[in-house]
Each structure stands twice: as structure tokens, then as C-alpha cells.
Image: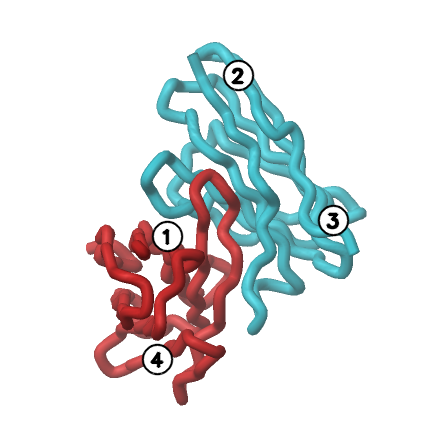
Chain colours: A cyan, B red
Amino acid sequence: DAGVTQSPTHLIKTRGQQVTLRCSPKSGHDTVSWYQQALGQGPQFIFQYYEEEERQRGNFPDRFSGHQFPNYSSELNVNALLLGDSALYLCASSSSGIGPYGYTFGSGTRLTVV
Amino acid sequence: RKEVEQDPGPFNVPEGATVAFNCTYSNSASQSFFWYRQDCRKEPKLLMSVYSSGNEDGRFTAQLNRASQYISLLIRDSKLSDSATYLCVVNTGGFKTIFGAGTRLFVKA
């Protein structure tokens, strides 16, 4: 049973560029949430996708956008990258929200903006 | 005020010690509560859900106090392998789940 798969694992981008991160949820899960984790901080909620719609968003600018596909996989796009966007980006999958079993996380994409 | 607050620690304890972490949350409508464990440079992993009546899983005990809006995690007989960051997680209702900044635990021989 495949867990949550994220790609790429590491990425280096230049300020002003755009990046796309990808996530395949755990088998049987239909909800994908994206988090940003800066060094030494807890994960910060970016947004959640369910049924191909963004249904909740955290305090992130419009430069952060996403998409969910019919197979439940998801993409996170960040435009006009800033140095402060350097972080670990985590994808969490669940079944119809968080439920009683919490989230299953992927191992993350470590983004470095230079 | 942060939505979920934790003492960042670090907590430095010897093997075999009992250690407790607390976490407070600001939204009284919060519905679901969890403790996650995160090892250095790894993804968070679910340690346990927290139920209103309190619950135990081996050496780990979680408690929820809705009136005071805090949850706790107690670790008994600490092992070296318990060294990690412990994240308090609260579902605030709707579809938003908030993580605390984490409490770092170091267990020493």
C-alpha cells in the first residue's frame, strides 16, 4: 500500500522563478492538504483540496496556488519565488477531511530559493 | 495569540524519566486533537489522537481539557528513541488543521 508520494525531493530555484511541486495521496485518500515548514517551525497550513476544489486556505498570498486532479493527486505552484519561500513543503493526505486518524504525510520537498 | 501554542523546550531528560508536554489552543470550537512526532529532517508522523476521556498507548498518555483549552502528552519510562520534536495538532473545525511549533525532547543515556 503506497503511502504519500511527493516529487521532487529537493529543488533549488532562483528568486522570481516559478515552481511546481507534486503529491500523490495514499491509496484510499481523497483529500490533500499542503503545508510549509520553515526550519525550526511547525508546519503552516497553505490550503486543502477535496473533489478538485480548494476548500480552505491559510494565510498565504495568491502566489501560492494549487490544483487537484480527478485521481486525487495534487500540485502546489508558487510564483515569483522569494528567499523566504525556502522551506520544506509537506503534502498530507486524508479521507474526506482529517477524520479520527489524522493525516499521512509525504516525506516532503525541500525547496531552496537563492 | 497563536492558534496553537507549545513550549518549544528543549526538554533534556535521562532515560527512564517521565516527561509531560502541554499545548494550548485558542479556538473553543476545535473538534479534533492529535499529537505528532517529527524526527530531524523527516515528515511528521501521527503518534496518537487525543480523546475527551483521555487515552493511553503504551508509555504514552494523552489528555484533553476542553474547559481550559489544552491538551497534554505524558511519556513514561523515556527511551533514547523518544528523542524527537512533538507537535500538537488541532482541527479548528471546517477543514483547517493547525500545527503547533513543536516541543523538542532529548533523552540522554
Element type at mark 4: strand
Residue at image point 59% right, 63% down: A97
The amino acid sitting under disc 3 is: Tyr
Q: Nearer the viewer, mark 3 or mark 2?
A: 2
Total number of numbered discs in the rendering: 4
Element type at mark 3: loop
The quadrant of the picture occupied by the N terminus of chain A is bottom right
Mark 3 vs 2, N-terminal side: 2
| Residue bearing mark 4 | B63
Q: Nearer the viewer, mark 4 or mark 1?
A: 1
Residue at image point 54% right, 44% down: A34
Marks 2/1: CA–CA distance: 26 Å
**Numbered disc 4: what chain?**
B
Q: Position of residue B5 (x, y in %)?
A: 25, 58
User: Up-down: is B23 above or below A73?
Assistant: below
| Residue bearing mark 2 | A12
Element type at mark 2: strand
| Residue bearing mark 3 | A72
- How many residues crowd mark 3 within 10 Å: few (<14), some (14–19), many (20+)? many
Marks 3/2: CA–CA distance: 27 Å
| Residues behind callouts 4 and 3 on a single chain | no
The amino acid sitting under disc 4 is: Gln
- How many residues crowd mark 2 within 10 Å: few (<14), some (14–19), many (20+)? few
The disc placed on residue B85 is 1
Q: Position of residue A57 (x, y in %)?
A: 47, 47
